[in-house]
Image (cartoon, rainbow, N blue to C red):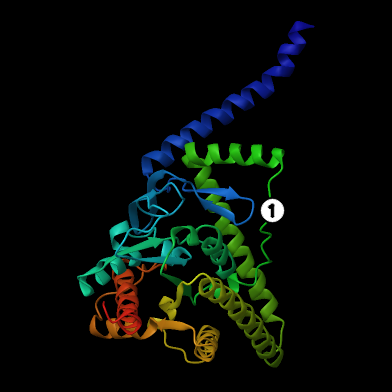
């Protein structure tokens, strides 16, 4: 009887030991290679995901490896007091991964460079620029970042970094439930997942590969769908899709503008171009159509905005041997972040002088 039990248990035991051994070996290999970013996010019942507060780590890619620090409120950089110090102009930058800027050092992000530039332009005034960007966020999530977290810091100006490359499509996701909460079971499950992401590089590697496969499957699916649609129908669907994305985006931007205005905060939209717009000039692309539609709306509604595309194009013309984006990753590199900072700094400097004669 005992012998039979041993035989029954032997197979699962060997399989379990083999799995653990392979997992440990894989963990050693992945850690040795140093290719995985440290985990810097956790699940959130309302927004889906947020930064892990008080977390330091490294953000890594094929073209970069930079140290990152998250403050007590879950945003990039040092801690800030909710009470704004005297003689301080406080600016919030909200946006997605281009604003988050985990592809460059904190000092090279456009938020930090913007702060440095404004301090140079206004000797008698100090500035604080709080970087509240989070990768993957669309305009609706950025609204809640400002509403539930940003306004606590009593900002004077909020800058929405709007990336034309994917923010229009990101805004087509479903509405956020501000009252959503996790069940006790889901909370426990999230804690287990967070532990795994925090402590196992191989687990983060698996999640990253899984995410990439989902993107690839989506692209292939849409390619096949497009192949069976006639040219006329495809153009019609494209026009409808553009209108839906533009209508959705303008409504969300207007929500942020009204929220800011209702709290006495100036609002500025910084339109951030993709590498394709800068280096592959196609006047008929959907991206450009959407951008032009957005700028037309902003002008009509008298919403402050700065278009960064001309800054990138001019820089690329003057520096033909350099690029403003990582070729593989696609995010702005240190040059691109500097261009964004310059454009926003130029706009805000003029804006502040027009608003206050004592600057």
Give the answer, above or below, for where 297 lies relative to 221: below
Give the answer, above or below, for where 70 lies relative to 162: above
Where does residue 293 sit, x and y in percent of width and height? Answer: 55, 88
In the picture, the quarter occupied by the C terminus is bottom left
Residue nearest the observer in this picture, 127 or 88: 88
Where does residue 275 sit, x and y in percent of width and height? Answer: 41, 76
Residue at position x 51%, y 45% in the image = 204
Residue 132 placement: quadrant = bottom left
In the rendered structure, the answer to whether residue 193 lies left or right of residue 64 reads right
Res 329 visible: no
Give the answer, above or below, for where 299 lies relative to 345: below
Marks counted in the figure total 1
Where does residue 262 sit, x and y in percent of width and height? Answer: 54, 73
- Judging by the rendered image, the residue that carries numbered circle 1 is 180
Residue, far right: 1
In the picture, the quarter occupied by the N terminus is top right
Residue nearest the observer in this picture, 178 or 291: 178
Residue at position x 44%, y 82% in the image = 305
Residue at position x 41%, y 69% in the image = 156
Res 300 visible: yes
Where does residue 166 sit, x and y in percent of width and height? Answer: 53, 72
Name the element at disc 1: loop
């Amino acid at each position: 009887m005992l012998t039979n039990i041993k035989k029954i248990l032997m197979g699962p035991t060997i399989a379990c030991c083999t799995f653990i051994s392979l997992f440990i070996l894989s963990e050693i290999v992945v850690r040795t290679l140093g290719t995985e970013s440290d985990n810097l996010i956790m699940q959130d019942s309302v927004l889906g995901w947020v930064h892990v507060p008080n977390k330091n780590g490294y953000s890594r890619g094929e073209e970069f490896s930079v140290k990152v620090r998250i403050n007590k409120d879950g945003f990039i950089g040092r801690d800030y007091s909710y009470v704004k110090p005297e003689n301080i102009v406080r600016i919030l930058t909200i946006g997605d991964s281009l604003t988050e800027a985990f592809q460059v050092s904190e000092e090279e992000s456009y938020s930090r460079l913007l702060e440095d530039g404004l301090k140079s332009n206004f000797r008698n005034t100090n500035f604080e620029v709080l970087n509240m960007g989070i990768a993957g966020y669309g305009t609706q999530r950025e609204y809640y970042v400002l509403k539930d977290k940003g306004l606590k810091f009593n900002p004077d100006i909020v800058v929405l970094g709007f990336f034309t490359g994917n923010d229009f499509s990101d805004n087509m996701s479903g509405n956020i439930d501000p009252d959503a909460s996790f069940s006790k079971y889901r909370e426990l499950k999230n804690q287990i997942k967070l532990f795994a992401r925090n402590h196992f590089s191989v687990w983060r590697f698996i999640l990253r590969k899984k995410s990439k496969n989902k993107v690839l499957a989506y692209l292939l699916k849409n390619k096949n769908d497009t192949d069976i649609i006639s040219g006329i129908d495809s153009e019609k669907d494209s026009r409808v899709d553009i209108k839906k994305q533009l209508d959705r985006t303008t409504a969300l931007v207007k929500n942020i503008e009204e929220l800011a205005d209702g709290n006495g905060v100036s609002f500025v939209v910084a339109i951030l171009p993709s590498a394709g717009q800068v280096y592959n000039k196609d006047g008929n692309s959907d991206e450009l159509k959407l951008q032009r539609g957005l700028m037309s709306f902003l002008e009509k509604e008298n919403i402050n905005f700065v278009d960064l595309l001309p800054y990138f194009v001019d820089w690329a013309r003057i520096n033909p041997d350099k690029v403003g984006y990582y070729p593989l990753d696609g995010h702005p590199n240190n040059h691109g972040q500097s261009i964004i900072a310059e454009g926003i700094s130029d706009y805000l400097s003029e804006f502040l002088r027009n608003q206050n004669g004592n600057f």
